[in-house]
Amino acid sequence: MTHRILVVPTARGVGVTSICLGILRALDRLGLRIGFYNPVARKHPDRSSALVRLTTAIEPPLPIPIEEAERQLGEGRRDVLLETVVERVEDVSRDCDVVVVE
């Protein structure tokens, strides 16, 4: 069974990406199979996924662009957006012991 850790900011600029990288590093050192997913990219390119690619062997899926997420929410398609996120987290989880979701 894959465990998932959801890291959520409590304010702007609190270092969520740094925390995620630290968690990934610690789990990797324990020998666990790890994964990462950032569901919605606030900027292009997505800095979090890029840093994970540079510092680990993980190849996280591309996040949903913020414009797409806002469009779906504005059209009342929240369920479609949530299903997409859940589907991608499940894809990442397939071969992992722990997945960190930013």
Image: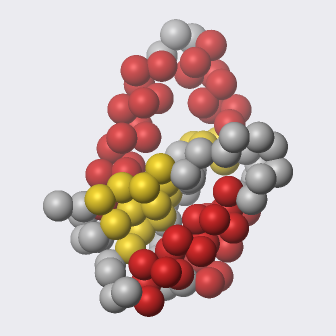
What is the residue that sits farthest to the right in this orientation?
Answer: 13
Residue at image point 74% right, 59% down: 15
In which quadrant is the N terminus drawn?
Answer: bottom left
Residue at image point 30% right, 51% down: 90
Q: Can the viewer see residue 50? A: no
Q: Quadrant of residue 83?
A: top left
Residue 51 horizontal/vertical position (percent): 67, 73
Residue 89 horizontal/vertical position (percent): 37, 51
Residue 65 horizontal/vertical position (percent): 65, 42
Q: Relative to residue 46, is residue 72 drawn left or right?
A: left
Q: Relative to residue 40, is residue 35 drawn left or right?
A: left
Q: Can the viewer see residue 63? A: yes
Residue at image point 27% right, 70% down: 97
What is the residue that sits farthest to the top in this orientation?
Answer: 76
Q: Quadrant of residue 2?
A: bottom left
Question: What is the basis of the colouring in this image?
Answer: secondary structure
Residue at image point 65% right, 25% down: 70
Number of callouts: 0
Q: Relative to residue 78, is residue 21 drawn left or right?
A: right
Residue 4 horizontal/vertical position (percent): 36, 55
